Amino acid sequence: MATTYHVLIAEDQHLLRGGLRTMVSSLPDYTVAGEATDGINACSLAWAIRPDLILMDLSMPGMSGIEAIAVIKYRMPQVRIIALTIHSSDEHVQEAFAAGADGYVIKDASFEELVGEMRLVMEGKRNPAFEQHAGNGVSCDPLPGVSRHAQLWHTLTARERAVLRLVAEGCTNRQVGEYLQLSPKTIEKHRASLMRKLDVTNVTGLVLIALDMGVLPLSKPARALDRFL
């Protein structure tokens, strides 16, 4: 009996998501098991449906695709993830690779190229071009531009980055733990590590640094800070 792979599509743009759904559904050995429109939704669906493969847009609102990849790979290392993006620079490929992506496809690629990458990663292989770009890349800042805290981003682990984003958004230890499927005590340890690395003494400091890094969108500081001031 042929194997059927269950695919989760994480893409915030309706037309692109629909196109991916149509393409994946046309393949005899793949089926669309779920669709997400942001990183947090992608994480929640990943826990619920346990997909074999995730097609992950890197530029989604809220938790980014990069952060979602890191979180999902930590909890579900067996799942295969292909990063989808408009960017082809070494820096973007390296960031996806570091987060745990198994493959990388530019959004203007052909249907055949996407299918080829899907089959490759499901065989446990990596596209040589992906590894070459990832090896040439250097870590990049969360958002373009120069920030005095940007270089500190590179000292954080993937899990610490996910915790920083969620804490800065106003989530409690319990809520962060639910998103990442970790205990509140473990989240508290990560918060303490973040405060030590970023040289702050409270959550307000974490929120302000997250803003300076570009981790927290400028539309959200009032809500995030109101929780702690």
Image (spheres, rainbow, N blue to C red):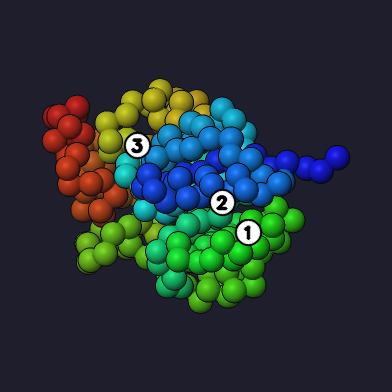
Up/down of 4 relative to 126, above or below: above
Residue 121 in percent (x, y) is at 67, 57
In this rendering, would 168 be left or right of 176?
A: left
At x 59% / y 74%, what residue is drawn? 129
At x 47% / y 50%, what residue is drawn? 19
Dot in front, 2 or 1: 2
Residues tagged 2 and 3 counted as in contact (Cβ below 8 A) = no
**Residue 5 vs residue 190, the one in the foreground:** 5
Residue position marked by numbered label 1 in the rendering: 115
Asked where in the image residue 195 lies, by quadrant, the reply is: top left
**Residue 117 vs residue 169, the one in the foreground:** 117
Dot in front, 2 or 3: 2
Residues tagged 2 and 1 counted as in contact (Cβ below 8 A) = yes
Label 1 sits on what residue type?
Val
At x 56% / y 55%, what residue is drawn? 82
Crowd rating for badge 1 (residues with CA inside 10 Å; few <14, some 14–19, many 20+): few
**Residue 41 vs residue 183, the one in the foreground:** 41
Query: How far apart are the alpha carbons under marks 3 and 1?
Result: 34 Å
At x 33% / y 26%, what residue is drawn? 172
In this rendering, would 13 be left or right of 35?
A: left
Label 3 sits on what residue type?
Leu
Residue position marked by numbered label 2 in the rendering: 23
Element assignment for label 1: helix
In this rendering, would 143 be left or right of 38?
A: left
Residue 78 in percent (x, y) is at 67, 44
Residue position marked by numbered label 3 in the rendering: 166
Dot in front, 3 or 1: 1
Query: How far apart are the alpha carbons under marks 2 and 1?
Result: 9 Å
Sequence order check, earlier mark of 2 and 1: 2
Sequence order check, earlier mark of 2 and 3: 2
